[in-house]
Image: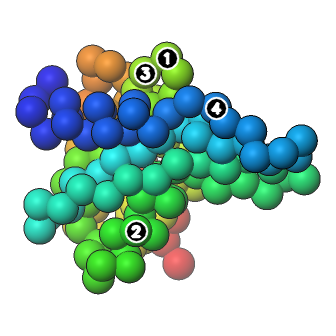
Amino acid sequence: MDKDFEILYKKAKDLTGEKKLNESVSYAHVGCALLTDKGNIYTGICIVAHCGIGFCAEHAAIIEMLKNDESRILKIVATDKNGAISPCGRCRELIKQINDDNMKTQIMISDNEIYTLEELLPHAWIP
């Protein structure tokens, strides 16, 4: 694992650990950290609500990035209690849709596997 992914992995893992807000809402099952082409790191956590609405950690990190007028992701990692995990299809599509160059984004999908978004999303949705 390269130094960037080591840093991202640690930041994501430090955010991970299920917490309960109340009987209906929990959060931080998943943490995420991403590195932009400008060298900035943004993080996010997930939220899970029993009513079915929830929010992925990758989306939260991407929103933080967008608040800072950035959209190009070089590397991204999400973790749960067991280690690195692959982003869901909704997250993959969002990464692609915010910047076409993100098809080259490197994504850690397990503790020893890294793929580009292009490899994980060979048939992206095109409007």
Disc number at residue 83? 3
- Give left or right: position of 106 versus 44: left
Q: Which amino acid does label 1 sit on?
A: Asn
Q: Which numbered disc, 4 or 1, marks the residue that appears first in the sequence?
A: 4
| Mark 2 Cα shell of 10 Å, populated few (<14), some (14-19), many (≥20) | some
Residue 9 in picture, x, y percent from top left? 29, 33
46, 85: nearer the viewer = 46
- Give left or right: position of 69 versus 49: left
Residue under label 2: 64
Q: SS at mark 1?
A: loop
Q: Are marks 3 and 2 in contact (CB under 8 Å)?
A: no
Q: Which numbered disc, 3 or 2, marks the residue that appears first in the sequence?
A: 2
Inter-mark Cα distance, 2 to 4: 21 Å
- Give left or right: position of 79 versus 112: right
Disc number at residue 48? none
Q: Are marks 1 and 3 in contact (CB under 8 Å)?
A: yes
Residue under label 1: 82
Inter-mark Cα distance, 4 to 3: 14 Å
2, 28: nearer the viewer = 28
Q: Please name which of the two marks, 4 or 3, marks the residue nearer to the observer.
A: 4
Residue 105 in picture, x, y percent from top left? 25, 52
